[in-house]
Amino acid sequence: MQAWLECCAFVDQRDRYRCRCCGRRTRQTLTLCPERREHHHLVGRNVAPGLVCDPRNVITVCLECHDTLTRHDIRVEGCADSMFTSDGQQYLNADHRLHFTPAESAAG
């Protein structure tokens, strides 16, 4: 638990308390409001458990963007030269610039 809290504190400062997707200023609150600060794992916790508390795998997001990321309505992209390696796999690095684009619809 302590490692996760430290990770979140680092990520919040790195991201300047703003949503990495839309730029909205976020705030820590229990209220379900658009500016609620949440944290999103670029690679899911079940896919890479070793990266759960790694700040390179976590971004600050607002509630609205977190919902769209979780539903995979937004795709996260980054540059290959800014990826990091863990256990022989390469992953997007949240310490670098990321791009967020609407995912192509399944119907489309």
Image (spheres, helix red, strand yellow):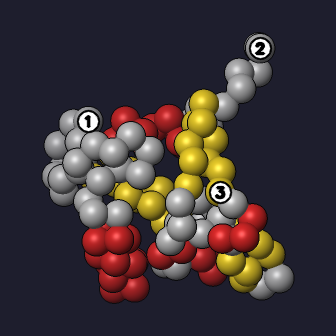
Residue 108 bears which disc, if any? 2
Q: Nearer the viewer, mark 1 or mark 3?
A: 3
Locate residue 11, reporting x and y percent. Answer: 37, 71
> Residue at 19% across / 57% down in the picture?
28
Locate residue 25, reporting x and y percent. Answer: 23, 48
Confirm whether residue 83 shows in the render. Answer: yes
Instruction: Quickly name the residue at label 3.
Output: 78
Which one is nearer the viewer's eye here, 37 or 45? 37
> Residue at 35% across / 63% down in the picture?
15
Query: In the picture, which quadrant includes the N terminus?
Result: bottom left
Q: CA distance from mark 3 to mark 2?
A: 24 Å
Question: Pointers 1 and 3 in contact (CB under 8 A)?
Answer: no
- Lower position in the chain sequence, tag 3 or tag 2: 3
- Lower position in the chain sequence, tag 1 or tag 3: 1
Confirm whether residue 1 shows in the render. Answer: no
Locate residue 90, reporting x and y percent. Answer: 77, 72
> Residue at 69% across / 60% down in the picture?
79
- Lower position in the chain sequence, tag 2 or tag 1: 1
